[in-house]
Image (spheres, rainbow, N blue to C red):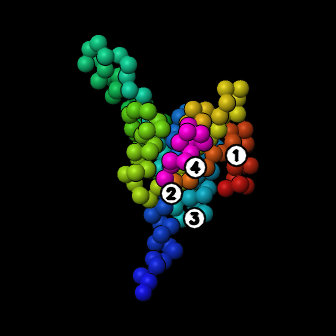
C-alpha cells in the first residue's frame, strides 16, 4: 500500500533556491539565475550574506560595535538586492544574515531549512579563479552537500543568464 503523493503544487511552493551574496559582480548572475528558476517553478529565493567574525578582540565594546555595523551593512545590501529582485521577477526574497565561515553557514542553513533544494553560486571569471566558495563546493565539499549546487559562470551577461534559466 502506497501513501498518496502530495500534489506537485504543494511540493514546489515550499522549494527554495539559496543564493550567497558576496558583493562580487558575478553575484548578480547567481541571483538572477535563482530568481528566474524560482519564478518558473513557483519556488522561493533566500539571499544569504555571511559576515566574517571580527578579528579585533581587545575591547568587547569595540568588537560588538564592529559586529553591529557589519550586520547593518549586510542587511542594507540584502534589502537593496531584494528590492531589485522583486522589481525584476515579482519574487519576495527571504533575507538571512549569518556570522562565520561562508561554507559552514551555508551547510548549517541548509540543514535547518528543509525547503532549500538548490544552492546557487556564481563563479568568478578573473585570473584568481572561480572563488573560494565555488572551489569548496565543487571540490572538497562536492560529495557531502545534501542538495545540488548550481554554478553560474560569472562571464555571462544577464541575457545569457535569462536564456539558461
Q: Which dot, 1 or 4, sits closer to the camera?
A: 4
Q: Residues within 10 Å of mark 3 (few under 14, many from 20)?
A: some
Instruction: Give SS at disc 1.
Output: helix
Q: Give how far across and how far down residue 122 sits, in percent.
A: 62, 41
Q: Name the residue under label 2.
A: 117
Residue at left offset 61%, top offset 49%: 150
Disc 3 and disc 4: Cα gap in Å? 17 Å
Q: What element carries label 3?
A: loop
Q: Position of residue 113 (x, y in %)?
A: 40, 54
Closer mark to the observer between disc 3 and disc 4: 4
Residue in the image at 40% along x and 32% along y: 100
Q: Mark 1 points at which residue?
A: 158
Q: Which of 2 and 37 is in front in this view?
A: 2
Please rate how many residues cluster around mark 1, counting C-alpha atoms within 10 Å: few if below 14, some from 14 to 19, many from 20.
Answer: few
Tell me the number on the disc at residue 12: none
- In this view of the protein, can residue 41 be seen by the observer? yes
Q: Is residue 153 left or right of residue 96?
A: right
Residue underneath mark 3 = 41
Label 2 packing within 10 angstroms: few (<14), some (14-19), many (20+)? some
Count of numbered circles on the image: 4
Q: Name the residue under label 4.
A: 149
Q: How far is mark 2 from mark 3, CA to CA?
A: 12 Å
Foreground: disc 2 or disc 1? 2
Earlier in the chain: of badge 3 and badge 4, it is 3
Residue in the image at 51% along x and 74% along y: 8
- CB-based contact (under 8 Å), mark 1 and mark 3: no
Amino acid at each position: 500500500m502506497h501513501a498518496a503523493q502530495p500534489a506537485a503544487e504543494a511540493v514546489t511552493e515550499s522549494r527554495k533556491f539559496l543564493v550567497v551574496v558576496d558583493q562580487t559582480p558575478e553575484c548578480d548572475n547567481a541571483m538572477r539565475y535563482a530568481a528566474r528558476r524560482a519564478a518558473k517553478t513557483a519556488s522561493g529565493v533566500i539571499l544569504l550574506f555571511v559576515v566574517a567574525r571580527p578579528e579585533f578582540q581587545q575591547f568587547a565594546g569595540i568588537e560588538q560595535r564592529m559586529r553591529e555595523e557589519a550586520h547593518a551593512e549586510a542587511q542594507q545590501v540584502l534589502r537593496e538586492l531584494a528590492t531589485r529582485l522583486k522589481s525584476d521577477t515579482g519574487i519576495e526574497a527571504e533575507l538571512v544574515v549569518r556570522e562565520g565561515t561562508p561554507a559552514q553557514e551555508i551547510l548549517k542553513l541548509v540543514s535547518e531549512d528543509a525547503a532549500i533544494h538548490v544552492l546557487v553560486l556564481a563563479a568568478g571569471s578573473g585570473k584568481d579563479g572561480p572563488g573560494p566558495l565555488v572551489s569548496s563546493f565543487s571540490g572538497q565539499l562536492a560529495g557531502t552537500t545534501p542538495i545540488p549546487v548550481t554554478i553560474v559562470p560569472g562571464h555571462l551577461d544577464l541575457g545569457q543568464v535569462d536564456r539558461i534559466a
